Image (cartoon, rainbow, N blue to C red):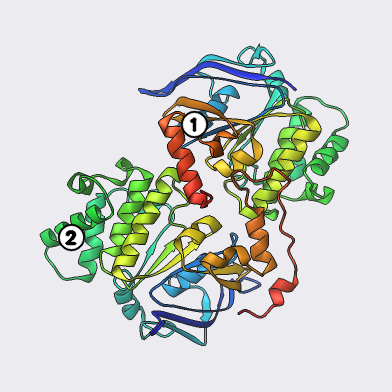
Amino acid sequence: MKPFEVENMSITFGKVTVLPAVSFQIEAGECFGLVGESGSGKSTVLRCASMLLNLWDGEARIGGKSVKDMPAMERCRTLQMVFQDPYGSLHPRHSIRTTLSEPLRIHGLDNQQQRMEQAMTDVGLPLSFLDRFPHQLSGGQRQRVAIARALILEPDVLFLDEPTSALDVSVQAEILNLLVRLRDEKGFTYIMVSHDLAVIDHMCDRFAVMKSGHIVEVLPRTAILDGSAKAPYAQELIAASLAYEGAA
Amino acid sequence: MADPILDIQNLTLRYPNAPTPAVCGVSFTLGQERLGIVGESGSGKSTVGRAIMRLLPDATMQADRMSFAGVDLLNASEKQMLKLRGARMSMILQDPKYSLNPIQRCGDQVAEAYRTHVSTTKSDAKAKAIAMLEAVQIRDPERVYDLYPHEVSGGMGQRIMIAMMLLTDPELVIADEPTSALDVTVRLQVLSILDDLVKQRGIGLIMISHDLNLVRNFCDRVLIMYAGRIVETLDAKDLDHARHPYTRGLLAAQPRIGGPRRPLPVLDRDPSWLSEATL
């Protein structure tokens, strides 16, 4: 378990400043949520912190070490990411076995077969699925493969970019349960991007509300119901979510 | 319900080369009400909507009866359908980014919908379009009229689409996941605009969605579909008292704000659901 912190992260695309200066801290083993409307920069934070985008200023540290100073190999073993769309994030012409063995081969890990079997068991897929291709799996099963691929390098921090928004509620429940169980078993630190406050409330201890690149407020999970949010936009978002759910 | 707008009995639809029918024995009637169709992806809910509009020319369609305000939809010619579509029944699609023409001004697209079905002058159509844009609560409709789809936000795009679909005063509107591409903060706004207009004009609305909360709040009656069949029909307010295990499974699988953080109940699919007679 390692803590994660972001300090003054900023990035501009051309003339547009997408993130002016974002800072937050996450404790080891915490599940931290990022919410906000589309275009507010939630995913950009994850893409910067994972160095998928590398021209940004500021710092992101995992266990005190800056991700910018980590060599790619070490970085990939420290943090992994699960993407939104399970249909787009797996190579369509690679079998699940190839998808899972590639990171093992790159990192020169031993016991490849055993590690693959362990990862498949961890995400609750039968071992026979190793020889299937993504088009032979349902959306939920593909998302499990994407999670298995992230787990197989035994990272400390997992970035979850809307991991369930492309899935049906029934399948979403399976994936959320899986993520909760894996965190209990392996002690990951999660950062979860979502636009669904109910999912955030189910998973996270604290969450940050983002609007046009700024974190307007960091709130504990309880703030959704007790109305302690102070920033007007956070209040608006929470009110809209509650009204939408009909729980108010 | 005196005279149903839409009456469908025993609709079965099969896509070419598909092993099983996508829709199987679906029956329902619709009056001046708001009907929700809920189900998982692949349950056939959108297919039902498209079948009503006859937008699936490759599929084979069978039904005991399929009539819309006196018109037999099964045997209507394409010429008759062209007169119906857009004029008397229309469809609001999921994502305004993909369903508006990117190289035409928003307002012209709204006016075009009107001019296709009503013989009128250009300037009259424009005035109608602007009035309609105002009705969907777009501030400054004259300015928005001249904008291109990439210049408007998702919520505004969806309101433009609603304006386009309601301008011809249809009797039936099919909304296929009208808000799933929008943020929560705008979602309610767009829904309440749609809801007001549908009520004012006495339109029959079919809301296709995977979102139980939306249907609960914005529909009178709900059909729950599973694998091409209707497994349960309920009044929206009775959704919590659903009896079918599939509906109850869907409701329970939804995380709730302030809910207990136990593992969420997972749907246990029973093969017998497939063979049950539809209601």
- Tell whether B151 sits left or right of A98: left
The residue at the point 83 percent across, 43 percent down is A121
Q: Amino acid at mark 1?
A: Ala
Q: Amino acid at mark 2?
A: Lys
Badges 2 and 1, same chain: no
Q: Which residue is mark 2?
A: B128
Q: Which residue is mark 1?
A: A229
Secondary structure under tag 1 reads loop
Q: Position of residue B185 (x, y in %)?
A: 43, 43
Q: Is residue B152 above or below residue B225?
A: above
Between the residue at mark 2 and the residue at mark 1, the CA separation in whole angstroms equals 43 Å
Q: Is residue B56 visible?
A: no
Q: Quadrant of the N terminus of chain A?
A: top right
Q: Quadrant of residue A235?
A: top left
Report crowding for label 1: few under 14, some 14 to 19, many 20 or more residues within 10 A (C-alpha).
some
Q: Nearer the viewer, residue A5 or A145?
A: A5
Disc 2 and disc 1 in contact, CB within 8 angstroms: no
Number of marks in the rendered image: 2
Q: Position of residue A247 (x, y in %)?
A: 54, 50
Q: Position of residue A198 (x, y in %)?
A: 58, 44
Q: Nearer the viewer, residue B57 or B121?
A: B121
The residue at the point 63 percent across, 67 percent down is B242
Q: Nearer the viewer, mark 2 or mark 1?
A: 1
Q: Nearer the viewer, residue A36 or A80?
A: A36
